[in-house]
Image: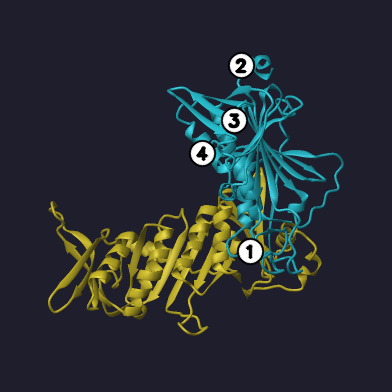
Amino acid sequence: MKFKAFLTDNGINLLEKRILPALDKTGKICHLYLTPDHAFFLHNLLNSDGPQSIAQFQVPSLFHDYRISSQNDDVIAFSIDLSLLHRALRSILTVNSHSNPIQIKLVKKLPPQSTQPTPFLTFEAKGHKSAVVHDVPVSKPLSRADVRELQLALDSAQQMPETLVKAPELNLLQNFVDRMKHVGDVIRVSISKYGDLHLQISTTLITLGAEFRKLVVLGERADGADGGDQGLSAQSRTERAVQRGDAMSVQVSVKHFFKCLQSSLAKPDCAFYGIAPQGACLIVIFQFFVPGTRQTDKSISLHCRLPVLDSGSS
Amino acid sequence: MLCVDMWWCPMECACRIEGIWMDAVVELSEHGIVIIVEDTSCLQAKVYLQRELFLKYDYGAQGRPRFGVSLGLFVDCLNTFSAPGRSNILELRSVDSPDACIYAEIRTRIPETISWDYNFEPAGSTPLSFTVKSAALKEAIDDLEWPGSSIQIKLQPVPPSVIFRGEGHGDLQIDFNYYANTDLLIAFSCDRQVSHRYKYKFLRATTSNIPSSVIRDNRGSKLTIGRGGMLKVQHLVSVAKPSVPHPHVESAGYQPPSRIAYIEFFVKPEEVEDDTVNDS
């Protein structure tokens, strides 16, 4: 089992400034899954509770001189502490003032006061006179069965909702949910084919909600049907859309939802919300543009899947 | 319609006693909204939000409807509306475009019966009152924390002065002399000596959360002793934000007629002193 590669400048920047801070908010520990073509950071894919987050990178967007080999079809997966990884990366960038290339590799080392060699992900910047090395402890590589399970979970996580609406400004939404989260623990998210996104927290004492209408719709859409709904309240409009089968509605944990919104630390260019078929989960897809263009950067993808607390009135 | 920030200052002051949000009774009338909070039957705080504070105030009810509400929830809810960088006008429609709205419905509670009558009556023909710079009042009450427990407030006509005295672990006396400190003690009215004791905890509640703007403006807080030694503390809270022009008022230069909210506290005296002796 071998893995080594050099981080590209773009990759360093992307990981250090954007991806790692965002993923760290979702959860400290994640799986790093490396295949010959892709690198994935995966949260909560093997244990189903908790919000899942899937960050996928094509190898060239992070690495060059990428070498990977294993007896399991040349894929390697292990779990890693993101805050340690982030710290190690930041630290090596501070020390590495001569911009020597940074190599990343998987090694087995004997930690002090131990007789058992343990695996580390090592960052190494080698110059003419000095070398800086940082070891980040990682878990034992996942077994063949576990990797298979991870791959299956990843495959099923690719299932897309029929309707996606483009989220209003991310910061606005994040601020809003940040304030809303004091009021209750469960948030109802409703998405209609007309392009409406309706968020609502309801407890015995309070109903607090926000409705965003006429958002950009991807996938299945419906129009014209909301003509008679203009004068209605957000709540009854959503109810009617759900009854007509033009909207879906699920309940998720406010905490999960807020965590997912914090992915905006990765500075995505836009985000889409959708509900998986049968209301299986709430899906938030973050999109990145090729710098300086309005074209989607297909080499990076980040999306979250939030477990549904109650099937809702889908 | 109301600027959300306006609610916050007066409510924070009056309604967070000992750092805990209380349940409140809200009374609506043609003059505005009064929020009333009570603590252990000894302290009552009232916030007056006059109708002039509102951009639009529709009142069509008969009588004065009252309802109970959990203030913590109310404030959390109002906070949701005042997302930074957005217009902080509490409207139920249109946050930043006709296609977005934030709404809230808070279930009201049955107001609990007010346990004692706070009808404040003057103690005699001449009011027993003094007005002191708010910052000085707060400082004095903060200092009296050290002796703690019970604080005596004494007003005497000759020489005209107000004395705060605390006895506990030690004793501490703070004198406000009218002639010596005319800039501290702004007004003074007293025709006979009067003295009452109040629980420190309740006295502190009257100043501990006053908004920084009250201290900054330092207008003065008025303290009046009424019949039976009931103490009334009044603060004026400026809720104007002159630096931020009102985004929803079209006519330039328009200022709503009133930008002041009133806060009143009523504190019952301790029942150890013989009022007839002191009031005579």
In this figure, which residue is indicated by the disc labeled 2? B273
The colour assigned to chain A within the rendered structure = yellow
Classify residue A71 by image quadrant: bottom left
Amino acid of disc 3: Ser
Instruction: Point out which mark residue B161 bears.
Output: 3
Chain designation of label 4: B
Instruction: Point out which mark residue A232 bears.
Output: none
Q: Of marks 4 and 1, which one's residue comes earlier in the chain?
A: 4
Q: CA distance from mark 4 to mark 1?
A: 31 Å
Q: Of marks 3 and 2, which one's residue comes earlier in the chain?
A: 3
Disc 1 element: loop
Chain designation of label 3: B
**Nearest to the observer: residue A264 or residue A308:** A264
Disc 2 element: loop
Amino acid of disc 4: Glu
In this figure, which residue is indicated by the disc labeled 1? B244
Q: CA distance from mark 3 to mark 2?
A: 20 Å
Amino acid of disc 2: Glu
- Please name the residue shown 54% across and 53% down the image: A254
Disc 3 element: strand
Chain designation of label 2: B
Q: CA distance from mark 4 to mark 2?
A: 26 Å
Instruction: Point out which mark residue B139 bears.
Output: 4
**Nearest to the observer: residue B47 or residue B23:** B47
Percent coordinates x, y for residue B101 in the rendering: 69, 62
Check chain identity for marks 3 and 2: say if they share one.
yes
**Nearest to the observer: residue B264 or residue A135:** B264
> Marks 2 and 3: in contact by CB < 8 Å?
no
Q: Quadrant of the N terminus of chain B?
A: bottom right
